[in-house]
């Protein structure tokens, strides 16, 4: 039976903890090969454990100096990750430690009862899975995008216990097998529909065919159900669109025996259910539909709950009005949190700015001190208006206001920058709350903003080389590279030397950067990239009063090579411009013709464009 959308209104709270600090992660645990009924939550650098009845049995203060970002429970083993640090505890005793080269987004361990040894896997921002053995790095597995979430295939690691499903921030989904020596990719699903990044994954047999489906939640509110016609052939069977990002997804039997459900928790706190229970009944002509006693009681309970909430809202509103008018009133700014993401899209070389608020958004004002183009977004229903800017004295190149419709909590914008021009993009977010308040969020537009991290480059291309030498430290030159290029970890890498590879998402040119204390080598097949790096790095060194010795090695063949990469794009734009001129000419001709001219098929045969277009 196909699942249908239904709000989960019949859930009753079993227990509640007292208000406190933010809970960053939640996981279920218990002894191996037993029901996982114990609840573990990460709060700051502390892990707490609760029974399913709400009794706290664990309060473990870790030795982490920052908040826990990722957590995984396997029997008595506890795997915790901060931004760059991984720790393994067994019975709350420190066992292993690892410092990652880039930010850790998620952590998982292969099932110990099946693979017979502890194999932690880290999902890192630099598009790799890091497989550990104790405190050592066993190997790295490259992925097509930055992984944001990991899950065991089929809930138990698949047939071998070594299969892991991953989701990326750019919307890709895949499965890889983690063996003792290497990772073997099994399948991968792209993001042709340009949907949001993947935030959560679960496996559950919601279709009742005896095979567990893959449940996926995305940051644009999409819920997807993938069915497996064969082991390596996932097929999208159903999808459902919600208005908020999906923070967590889980399958199970919750509301009524015999009917499975998918529960999804959204960013603002809503719990939504997809149920296999029929929610519509059809009757023949003259047949009277009668609601069951259970359904009638549900409707009555909902009406009573709604009336009580309306009364409570009116009471609180009157209370606030009275307090604001009293002589002892104290003004306070209401606090609200913003879930934002500013990422580069490889497909169209644009940046997506996603803003999500727990309450309705009134308007968003976007301002930039660098030239930017605002692109159309299909999912965006806000009304945009542009204001004139005076770019000369104030370096103000963009000022636009997005006015959102009622109950809009998520807004997605797209901008495209020009490499070599760098600065700051600011978003002023005003929600529909009283008194009026606004939050300002800033996003850096970097000099080489259209470059994206990659694992390797083509060494056979004609390359230009920029060489820097001077009295600078490893940390200083790393901070300059962070300033120039996106997707570079802010933390200085371990070791004495580091190499990063990049690819321009618009032109396809490449960049290799290798640097250490006192030396920096940058190679690119695009001489413009080398020129931008030279200007920016020299300015940064001048700010710190560091003398640089700069030398070049220019390959003249690289100019021809780069022009060959640009030529198809110029040819496409030229062809597009010709089509626009043809359309304008046809519209003018249509305006001066009589009705009989529209019946003449010569225009359609010649240009392939109907007159009404």
Image (cartoon, rainbow, N blue to C red):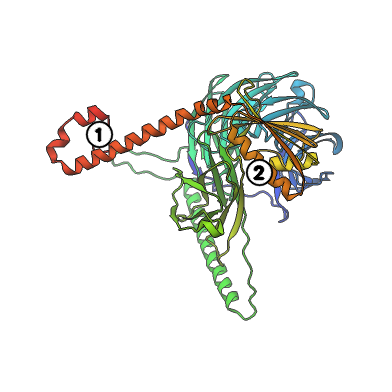
Neighbor class of circle 2 (other Cα within 10 Å; few <14, some 14-19, many 20+) is some
Number of marks in picture: 2
Q: Is residue 503 above or below residue 314?
A: above
Q: Are marks 2 and 1 in contact (CB under 8 Å)?
A: no
Q: Which quadrant: the C terminus?
A: top left
Q: Which residue is mark 1?
A: 610
Residue 16: x, y in percent?
69, 52
Q: Nearer the viewer, residue 245 or 495?
A: 495
Residue 511: x, y in percent?
64, 31
Residue at the spot x=75%, y=18% of the render? 181
Q: Distance of mark 2 from mark 1, alpha carbons?
A: 50 Å
Q: Secondary structure at mark 1?
A: loop
Q: Secondary structure at mark 2?
A: helix
Q: Residue furthest bottom?
A: 327
Neighbor class of circle 1 (other Cα within 10 Å; few <14, some 14-19, many 20+) is few
| Residue 46 relative to residue 219: left or right | right
Residue 558: x, y in percent?
58, 26
Judge whether residue 82 can be spotted in this image: no
Judge whether residue 421 can be spotted in this image: yes
In terms of sequence position, does the residue under pointer 2 or pointer 1 come before the other? Answer: 2
Q: Which residue is mark 2?
A: 536
């Amino acid at each position: 039976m196909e699942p249908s959308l239904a709000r989960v209104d019949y859930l009753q709270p079993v227990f509640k903890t007292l208000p406190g600090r933010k809970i960053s992660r939640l996981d279920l645990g218990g002894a191996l090969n037993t029901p996982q009924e114990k609840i573990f939550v990460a709060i700051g650098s502390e892990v707490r454990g609760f029974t399913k009845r709400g009794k706290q049995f664990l309060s473990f203060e870790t030795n982490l100096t920052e908040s826990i970002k990722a957590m995984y429970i396997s029997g008595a083993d506890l795997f915790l990750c901060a931004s760059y640090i991984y720790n393994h505890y067994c019975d709350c005793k420190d066992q292993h430690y690892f410092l990652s080269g880039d930010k850790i987004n998620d952590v998982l361990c292969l099932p110990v009862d099946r693979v017979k040894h502890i194999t932690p896997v880290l999902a890192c921002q630099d598009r790799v899975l890091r497989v550990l053995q104790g405190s050592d790095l066993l190997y790295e597995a490259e992925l097509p995008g930055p992984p944001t979430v990991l899950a065991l295939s089929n809930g138990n690691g698949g047939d071998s216990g070594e299969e892991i499903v991953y989701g990326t921030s750019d919307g890709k989904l895949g499965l890889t097998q983690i063996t003792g020596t290497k990772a073997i990719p099994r399948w991968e699903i792209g993001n042709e529909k340009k949907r949001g990044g993947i935030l959560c994954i679960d496996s559950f047999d919601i279709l009742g065919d005896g095979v567990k489906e893959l449940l996926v939640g995305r940051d644009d509110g999409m819920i997807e159900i993938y069915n497996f016609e064969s082991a390596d052939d996932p097929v999208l069977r159903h999808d459902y669109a919600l208005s908020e990002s999906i923070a967590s997804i889980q399958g199970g039997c919750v509301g009524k025996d015999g009917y499975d459900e998918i529960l999804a928790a959204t960013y603002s706190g809503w719990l939504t259910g997809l149920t296999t229970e029929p929610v519509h009944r059809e009757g023949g002509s003259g047949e009277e539909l009668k609601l069951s006693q259970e359904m009638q009681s549900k409707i009555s309970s909902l009406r009573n709950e709604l009336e009580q909430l309306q009364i409570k809202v009116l009471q609180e509103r009157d209370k606030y009005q009275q307090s604001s008018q009293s002589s002892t009133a104290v003004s306070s700014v209401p606090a609200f949190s913003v879930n934002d993401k500013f990422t580069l899209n490889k497909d169209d070389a644009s940046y997506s700015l996603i803003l999500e608020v727990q309450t309705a958004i009134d308007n968003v004002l976007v301002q930039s001190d660098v030239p930017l183009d605002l692109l159309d977004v299909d999912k965006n229903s806000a009304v945009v208006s542009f204001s004139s800017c005076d770019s000369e004295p104030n370096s103000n190149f963009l000022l636009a206001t997005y006015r959102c419709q009622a109950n809009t909590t998520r807004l997605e914008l797209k901008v495209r920058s020009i490499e070599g021009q760098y600065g700051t993009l600011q978003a002023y977010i005003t929600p529909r709350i009283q008194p009026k308040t606004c939050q300002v969020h800033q996003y850096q537009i970097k000099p080489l903003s259209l470059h994206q991290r990659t694992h390797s480059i083509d060494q056979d291309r004609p390359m230009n080389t920029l060489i820097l030498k001077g009295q600078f430290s490893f940390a200083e030159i790393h901070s300059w590279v962070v300033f120039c290029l996106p997707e570079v970890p802010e933390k200085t890498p371990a070791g004495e030397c580091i190499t990063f590879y990049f690819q321009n998402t618009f032109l396809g040119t490449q960049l290799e950067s290798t640097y250490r204390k006192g030396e920096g080598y940058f190679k690119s097949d695009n001489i413009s990239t080398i020129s931008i790096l030279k200007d920016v790095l020299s300015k940064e060194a001048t700010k710190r009063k560091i003398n640089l010795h700069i030398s070049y090695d220019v390959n003249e063949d690289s100019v021809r090579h780069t022009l060959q990469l640009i030529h198809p794009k110029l040819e496409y734009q030229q062809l597009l411009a010709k089509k626009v001129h043809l359309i304008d000419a046809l519209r003018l001709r249509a305006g001066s013709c009589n009705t009989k001219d529209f019946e003449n098929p010569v225009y359609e045969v010649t240009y392939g464009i109907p007159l009404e277009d």
